[in-house]
Image: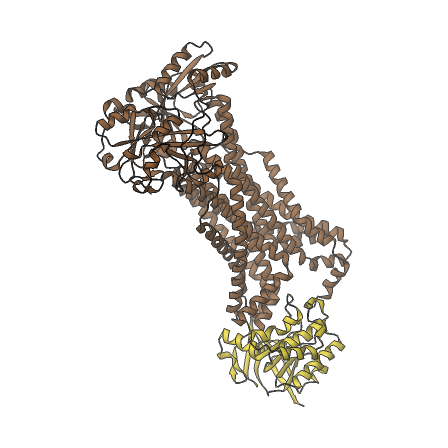
Chain colours: A brown, B yellow
């Protein structure tokens, strides 16, 4: 133990004398862990919220009866079904805002506990364990989660008012409740949501549903039973979103590990004499390796603690945007305050440890396997390095083959990420080989001695800068690739939105009765040139949640509906009732093309339709089908329109909107004008990519840090190469400029290679990852201005990284340069 | 103390094995000193590395204080090295990140034989008392070699191996270091095997042997 202790102490004393190296290693571990744990915190927080949401009413895998249109229905249905012997329990869902908290929308869920099926668990607790008397009795209770209570800045027992002036029953803390949800008695919910005698669903026990009961014929067209598991599961829908975040986090982690790898490699190289002295003093190779590994673990734990703490901070900063994206895209409510388990903290430390060992393993093994007497000979070290580079080139080749196989034979998102990972890693591994080859090719063309030195010395620096350049390549390629994809998506999305949102006003009535009244009222308004109702049915198609929409045959659709592919006379065939149009993501999921048939299960039996067109439907996690309204009503008799699109002159929109709100008490969610909808969609789009852009920029920052650290460490050992030039008459100013030129040259070559790699990455994202993750393919756009921006950013990062080492070099005294010669033996 | 019998060592080259040592037989008694001389490439350093257990011979045996080095495992060799021998190099090989005081104590601590009194005496006799808080890079070459000498002797090794210990020093520093070395050895039972080019340095030791093309060709007794 004494040997290990003193060996460790001698190894660690190196860091005291080389604090920059120490901080570079620590920075690598810190940044890598921070970005990774930050992303994991976001994912973990969201998944915890989904789990709480799925446990809101759970326990017996209930089936649920809901309106086919997705809206509310009369409470009389509940009474009729109970009288017919159906053990149903009513539910009412809606949203409201509290007075003074206008920016936060809360979900209200009204239940009737006494009729809930046996075995039901409410927010993770069995019914028998709950104080139902207090819940049902006056003034009742509003169950609320701790994070929601905190976000609202309210205390337990308070009775806040809704914006409509309705008082909530006293707030009562229920820890397992989903964030943003208020659970109340159904009577209270009807009062708060201004939905007297209305329900949004009926719960049905699994036992009863197992007998496959059929709804009474009077209700069959209006309602449907969704079996347990039919409902779109949030975790499933949001999987792609989280996978994308994870991929970015992983990329940042890998880039961070490049810093660690570079710092450990350099530290070992600088400590070669020390390693030999230790061995000569009687430290065995095993003991030395153990001491090096222990030192690395200590550093990893320190970096890990810093990383986990800052990862928490990063996640807290990004959480509001991620939560808003998830709410906007999927309607998923995620708690606004991080609440992470001890396992998360421990796994953060473990990942830091694992990363450090992974990044350091190569260097440690190389140090352990070099023969003792060769340990201090730079040539031996460089030969080992050269061998390592050759192995890297072979590995890169193997990775490229793997990428090709993933592209040709892969048909899943995971294989898409395998393709990306192989491509990026192969490119990174090939970078030093390419740069070295390029410089070797250039060298014979250099005639002037300084030019020869410039190129030859750049090549000599390559092994020490290779890792930092690889990190820069990865970060730049990710920046260009993700940037091109995001910008391309933005342009496509905005163009698509402009086409798709052709109507000036969109309206969703509270109930079919209100719909009829609105239709009659609008028929008398001269400014309304067209009233386009649409009928909506939600149904599962091959296990996937799908919205089936019935529309009228109207020029608005023919002129504006953005079709990606269409058979001849598609609109005529749709109007005829035998044709079907479907969204791109559903077509891919069901592997359907033009002319193929799709069979839908309806209350009137199977309905076979021919695919006549495929359209883009960006941002919709569910599948979407378009059919003729009259045909739809034949299969769902009695179905009422769920929404209306109104065509009218834009100038007339505000007045009509105001009149509709005054006449029918429609809130802003039921009545939306085109500009608001576009603005809202744009906001959701922007927030969706806030986390992506932040992680992207941070990754580039991490690469900049890697370059800075490598240059700084390199500058400490550069005097040996620069002093002879100085002695031969090259001024210090000129030396600084030459060094800057070398750094910029290497960065420029990296940048030139990063551009095609970035574009290839963008192609993979739009043509492979997007298709697998979301079901839609985007056109690949190249934005020269964006490429220039990325190039400028990379060069700026290089200049910033080089500034301090160059300044140090500029200020080096002649005495220090002379000492270089004095130390030569 | 040291007994070498029939020692052979060669290095592989593209043209075939290059013999460096070809049947070396040598003995060194406890407390005695021997200068190993020879031209560059004659195999002096190779022999020293073999005796230090840093390299392995092709054939033959090396026995130090009754222990056959070729019968020790890697970790046994390491333990033997830290407890039984002291090494001094031409380039000093101090630990640049440790202060002089810690460098002096380093090997003794590794061997579990740190004796503060002996270290204080060594420090004083080597004239390092005022330099204990300095780092190696803040010392002159002569001072650094004195620290290396102190480090090698702090654990009271049975055998001191010195590879051109004065090769990097000027004449006066060289004399000073050699004088100190011999004084310290005179008061201990440590044997000395020193590789040197310098006949002047070799003349100060009890015995001298000459290595030529891998063979001991000349041997004298003083």
Q: Is residue A502 left or right of residue A750?
A: left
* Residue B208 found in image quarter: bottom right
Please state, as top left, top right, bottom left or bottom right, where the N terminus of chain B lies in the image.
bottom right
Give x and y (percent) for residue A793: 62, 41
Give x and y (percent) for residue B212: 63, 81
In this rendering, the count of numbered labels is 0
Q: Is residue A52 left or right of residue A65?
A: right
Foreground residue among A101 and A2: A101
The extreme bottom residue here reads: B222
Foreground residue among A780 and A326: A326
Instruction: Note whether A692 is above or below A167 in the view shown.
Output: below
Foreground residue among A393 and B204: B204
The extreme front residue here reads: A138
Instruction: Mark yes or no: residue A230 visible.
Output: yes
Give x and y (percent) for residue A472: 58, 47
Please state, as top left, top right, bottom left or bottom right, where the C terminus of chain B lies in the image.
bottom right
Instruction: Mark yes or no: residue A756 visible.
Output: no
Give x and y (percent) for residue B194: 64, 80
Foreground residue among B81 and A301: A301
Q: Residue at x 63, y 58 (%)?
A: A19
């Amino acid at each position: 133990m004494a040997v290990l202790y003193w060996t460790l102490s001698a190894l660690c004393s190196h860091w005291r004398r080389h604090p920059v190296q120490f901080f570079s290693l620590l920075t690598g571990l810190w940044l890598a862990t921070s970005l990774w744990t930050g992303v994991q915190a976001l994912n973990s927080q969201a998944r915890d919220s989904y789990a709480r949401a799925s446990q809101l009413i759970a326990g017996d895998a209930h089936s649920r009866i809901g309106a086919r249109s997705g809206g509310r229905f009369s409470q009389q249905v509940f009474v009729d079904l109970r009288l017919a012997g159906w053990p149903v329990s009513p539910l009412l869902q809606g949203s409201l805002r509290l007075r003074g908290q206008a920016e936060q929308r809360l979900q209200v869920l009204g239940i009737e506990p006494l009729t809930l099926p046996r075995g039901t668990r409410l927010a993770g607790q069995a019914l028998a364990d709950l104080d139902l008397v207090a819940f049902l009795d006056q003034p009742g209770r509003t169950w609320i989660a701790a994070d929601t209570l905190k976000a609202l800045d309210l205390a337990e027992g308070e009775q806040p008012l809704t914006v409509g002036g309705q008082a909530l029953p006293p707030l009562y803390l229920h820890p397992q409740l989903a964030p943003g949800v208020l659970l109340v008695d159904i009577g209270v919910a009807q009062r708060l949501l201004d939905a007297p005698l209305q329900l949004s669903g009926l719960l049905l026990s699994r036992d009863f549903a197992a007998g496959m009961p059929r709804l009474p014929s009077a209700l069959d067209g209006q309602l449907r039973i969704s079996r347990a598991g039919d409902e779109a599961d949030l975790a499933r829908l949001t999987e792609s979103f989280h996978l994308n975040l994870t991929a970015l986090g992983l990329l940042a982690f890998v880039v961070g590990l490049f810093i660690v790898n570079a710092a450990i490699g350099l530290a070992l190289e600088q400590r070669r004499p020390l390693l030999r002295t230790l061995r000569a003093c009687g430290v065995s190779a095993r003991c030395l390796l153990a001491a090096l590994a222990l030192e690395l673990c200590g550093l990893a734990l320190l970096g890990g603690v810093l990383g986990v703490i800052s990862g928490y901070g990063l996640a807290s900063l990004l959480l509001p945007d991620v939560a808003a994206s998830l709410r906007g895209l999927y309607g998923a409510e995620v708690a606004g305050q991080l609440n992470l388990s001890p396992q998360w903290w421990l796994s953060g430390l473990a990942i830091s440890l694992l990363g450090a060992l992974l990044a350091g393993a190569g260097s440690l093994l190389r140090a352990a396997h070099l023969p003792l007497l060769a340990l201090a000979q730079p040539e031996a070290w460089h030969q080992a390095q050269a061998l390592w580079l050759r192995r890297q080139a072979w590995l890169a080749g193997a990775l490229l083959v793997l990428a090709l196989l993933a592209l040709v034979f892969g048909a899943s998102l995971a294989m898409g990420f395998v393709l990306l990972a192989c491509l990026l890693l192969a490119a990174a591994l090939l970078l030093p080989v390419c740069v070295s080859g390029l410089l070797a090719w250039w060298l014979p063309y250099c005639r002037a001695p300084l030019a020869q030195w410039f190129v030859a010395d750049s090549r000599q620096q390559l092994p020490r800068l290779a890792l930092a350049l690889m990190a820069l390549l990865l970060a730049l390629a990710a920046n260009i690739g993700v940037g091109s994809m995001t910008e391309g998506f933005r342009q496509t999305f905005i163009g698509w939105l402009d086409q798709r949102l052709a109507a000036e006003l969109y309206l969703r009535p509270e109930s079919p009765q209100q719909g009829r009244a609105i239709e009659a009222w609008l028929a008398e308004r001269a400014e309304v040139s067209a009233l386009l109702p649409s009928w909506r049915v939600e149904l599962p198609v091959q296990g996937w949640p799908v919205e089936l929409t019935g529309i009228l045959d109207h020029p608005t659709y023919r002129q504006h509906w953005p079709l990606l592919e269409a058979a001849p006379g598609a609109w005529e065939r749709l109007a005829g009732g035998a044709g079907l149009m479907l969204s791109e993501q559903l077509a891919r999921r069901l592997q359907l093309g033009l002319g193929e048939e799709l069979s839908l299960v309806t209350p009137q039996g199977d309905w076979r339709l021919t695919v006549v067109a495929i359209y883009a439907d960006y941002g919709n996690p569910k599948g979407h089908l378009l059919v003729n309204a009259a045909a739809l009503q034949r299969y769902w008799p009695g179905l009422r329109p769920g929404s209306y699109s109104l065509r009218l002159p834009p100038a007339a929109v505000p007045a009509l909107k105001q009149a509709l709100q005054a006449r029918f008490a429609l809130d802003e969610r039921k009545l939306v004008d085109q500009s608001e909808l576009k603005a809202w969609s744009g906001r959701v789009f922007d927030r969706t990519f806030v986390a992506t852009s932040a992680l992207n920029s941070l990754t580039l920052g991490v690469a900049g840090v890697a370059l800075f650290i490598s240059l700084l460490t390199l500058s400490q050992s550069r005097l040996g190469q620069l002093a002879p030039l100085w002695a031969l008459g090259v001024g210090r100013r000129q030396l600084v400029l030459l060094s800057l030129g070398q750094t910029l040259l290497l960065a420029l070559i990296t940048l030139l290679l990063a551009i095609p790699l970035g574009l290839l990455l963008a192609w993979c994202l739009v043509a492979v990852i997007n298709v697998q993750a979301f079901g839609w393919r985007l056109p690949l756009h190249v934005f020269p201005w964006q490429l220039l921006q990325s190039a400028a950013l990379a060069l700026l990062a290089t200049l910033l990284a080089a500034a301090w080492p160059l300044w140090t070099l500029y200020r080096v005294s002649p005495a220090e340069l002379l000492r270089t010669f004095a130390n030569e033996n | 103390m040291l007994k070498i019998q029939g020692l052979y060592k060669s290095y592989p080259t593209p043209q075939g094995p290059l013999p460096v040592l070809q049947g070396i037989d040598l003995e060194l008694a406890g407390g005695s000193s021997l200068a190993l001389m020879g031209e560059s490439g004659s195999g002096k350093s190779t022999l020293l590395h073999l005796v230090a257990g840093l390299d392995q011979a092709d054939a033959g045996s090396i026995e130090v204080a009754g222990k056959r080095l070729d019968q020790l495992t890697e970790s046994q060799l390491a333990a033997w090295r830290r407890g039984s021998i002291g090494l001094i190099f031409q380039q000093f090989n101090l630990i640049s990140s440790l202060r002089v005081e810690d460098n002096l104590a380093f090997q003794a601590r590794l061997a579990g034989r740190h004796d503060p009194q002996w270290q204080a005496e060594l420090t004083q006799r080597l004239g390092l008392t005022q330099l204990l808080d300095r780092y190696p890079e803040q010392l002159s070459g002569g001072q650094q070699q004195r620290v290396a000498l102190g480090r090698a002797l702090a654990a009271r090794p049975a055998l001191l191996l010195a590879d051109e210990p004065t090769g990097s020093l000027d004449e006066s520093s060289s004399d000073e270091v050699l004088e100190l070395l011999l004084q310290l050895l005179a008061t201990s039972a440590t044997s000395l095997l020193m590789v040197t080019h310098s006949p002047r340095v070799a003349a100060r030791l009890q015995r001298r042997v000459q290595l030529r093309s891998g063979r001991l060709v000349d041997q004298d007794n003083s």
